[in-house]
Amino acid sequence: MPFMSQIPQAKVDRTLEHLRSAVRDYGRVVYSNSLGAESMVLTDLIWSEVPEIEIFTLDTGRLHEETYSLIERLERRYQRRFKVYYPDPASIEAWVHGKGINGFYDSIENRQGCCHIRKIEPFRRAIAGAGAWVTGVRHEQSASRAQAVAVEVDAANGGIAKISPILEWTHDEVWDYIRAKKLPYNPLHDKGYPSIGCAPCTRAVEPGADSRSGRWWWENADSKECGLHPKTRVVTLNKSVL
Ligand code: SF4
């Protein structure tokens, strides 16, 4: 259904076609919902127009209260439930016992270890058996994400297809869509958080700063991914949407 917005309807339609073609091409398709602004767009498109795609999210145990409230607001709006995946309790206990409750600040190795237990392992369980997973990354978000392509082989996750249907959307278009459709969103975005992850690893940034600069701000820019979006790009698939 067209709606009152500045974003070209053709762009919305292309995104929908991309999602539908992923279902045709890959069968079981899952969406890894990060609950950021882009996710509000994709949640709306998927639950309204392509409900065959399963939506899941990862509860790392260290999210902001605002993020938990957002999950509840989305579920009420769409009368659907997210599948929520949790870290393995024994792995978390062992890690915290060894590294400390906030040991992720101490080294990149520690931080990546925490991300592995709280994000990567649950993520791999969530996508197990799927033909493709959907992500809300956009080219504008960072230098590494500028290299992303619309459909690629995710070699780090068993060769599953990785679908990025809003790569070309701009920041303004994402927010235009959210406002035009009066979608729920995380109120932390209004407090200077362009990208929201775990509470201890996310902070507000100055207006105009790189949207990922508030994540793991104590590290240099080269290491700022949790492992779900490795920077090494591999063979692009020749699928019908492209
Ligand atoms: S973002 Fe921080 S708290 Fe969350 S999993 Fe990674 S290191 Fe751990």
Image (cartoon, rainbow, N blue to C red):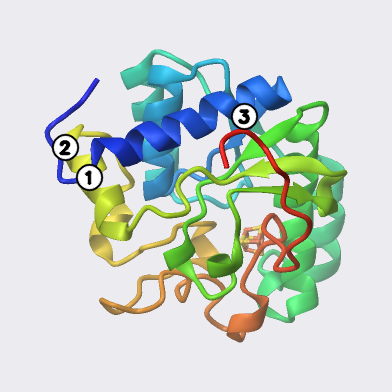
Relative depth, front residue between 101 and 178:
178
Q: Position of residue 217 (x, y in %)?
A: 52, 79
Q: Which residue occupies 25% across, 41% down?
A: 178
Q: Earlier in the sequence, mark 2 or mark 1?
A: 1
117 vs 49: above or below = below
Please say whether residue 71 is visible from this viewpoint.
Answer: no
141 vs 239: above or below = below
Q: Which residue occupies 41% across, 69% down?
A: 211
Relative depth, front residue between 222 and 86:
222
Q: Secondary structure at mark 2?
A: helix
Q: Position of residue 29 (x, y in %)?
A: 66, 27
Residue wearing tag 1? 7
Q: Amino acid at mark 3?
A: Ala
| Picture quadrant of residue 13 | top left
Q: Amino acid at mark 2?
A: Ala
Q: Which residue occupies 78% across, 52% down?
A: 117
Q: Is mark 1 within 8 Å of ligand 1?
A: no
Label 1 and label 3: CA atoms lie apart by 23 Å
> Is residue 75 shown left or right of residue 163?
left
The answer to the question of whether label 2 and label 1 lie on touching residues, with beta carbons closer than 8 A, is yes
Residue wearing tag 3? 22
Mark 3 neighbour class, 10 Å CA radius: few under 14, some 14 to 19, many 20 or more: many
Q: Earlier in the sequence, mark 1 or mark 3?
A: 1
Residue wearing tag 2? 180
18 vs 211: above or below = above
